[in-house]
Image (tube, rainbow, N blue to C red):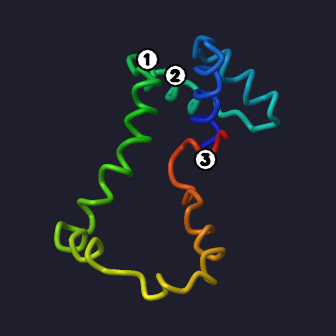
Amino acid sequence: MEYIYTALILNELDEEITEDTVTAVLEAAGADVEDSRVKALVAALEDVDIEEAVETAAVAPAAAAPAAGGAGAAEAAATEEPADEADGADEAEDDDDDEPSGEGLGTLFG
């Protein structure tokens, strides 16, 4: 994963992703650098628009969620009423449910 993170860091800094820049970042971070993995990463990312790939990856989990449960599950969830809706004492506990679930690349960087 550190190789992918290195590519993301270099992309964010508008630096060219080359064998030398990837190796320099990994060495600065104290990682054991494998030249074959660096070469494979650079070759694999040669024609990739990283911004587009990150955007697609961030949108894909949210778009796939309704499909995973099926239409019947979505309709059932929409018609159910919370059991403790009238009980205001549990509202403080419900606030924790509004927190992000930690999915996606965005949570790794911010």
Q: Where is residue 102 in the image (x, y as percent from the top left)?
A: 57, 56
Depicted 12 relative to depicted 106: above or below: above
Quadrant placement of the N terminus: top right
Assess whether mark 2 and mark 3 are in contact (beta carbons under 8 angstroms): no
Q: Residue 7 carries which label?
A: none
* Mark 2: secondary structure: helix
Circle 1 packing at 10 Å, graded few (<14), some (14-19), many (20+), is: few
Depicted 61 relative to depicted 96: above or below: above
Residue at 61%, 21% in the rendered image: 12
Residue toward you, 50 or 86: 86
Kindly identify the amino acid type of the residue bearing the numbered disc 1: Glu
Kindly identify the amino acid type of the residue bearing the numbered disc 2: Val
Give whichever of discs 1 and 3 has the lower sequence position. 1
Residue at 70%, 23% in the rendered image: 23
Circle 2 packing at 10 Å, graded few (<14), some (14-19), many (20+), is: some
Which residue is outermost to the left?
Answer: 72
Give whichever of discs 3 and 2 has the lower sequence position. 2
Residue at 59%, 60% in the rendered image: 99
Q: Where is residue 22 in the image (x, y as percent from the top left)?
A: 65, 23
- Determine which residue is flagged by label 1: 46
Quadrant placement of the C terminus: top right
Kindly identify the amino acid type of the residue bearing the numbered disc 3: Thr
- Determine which residue is flagged by label 3: 107
Q: How far apart are marks 3 and 2 (CA)?
A: 25 Å
- Number of dots carrying numbers: 3
- Determine which residue is flagged by label 2: 42
Q: Distance between the residues labelled 2 and 1?
A: 6 Å
Residue toward you, 37 or 82: 82
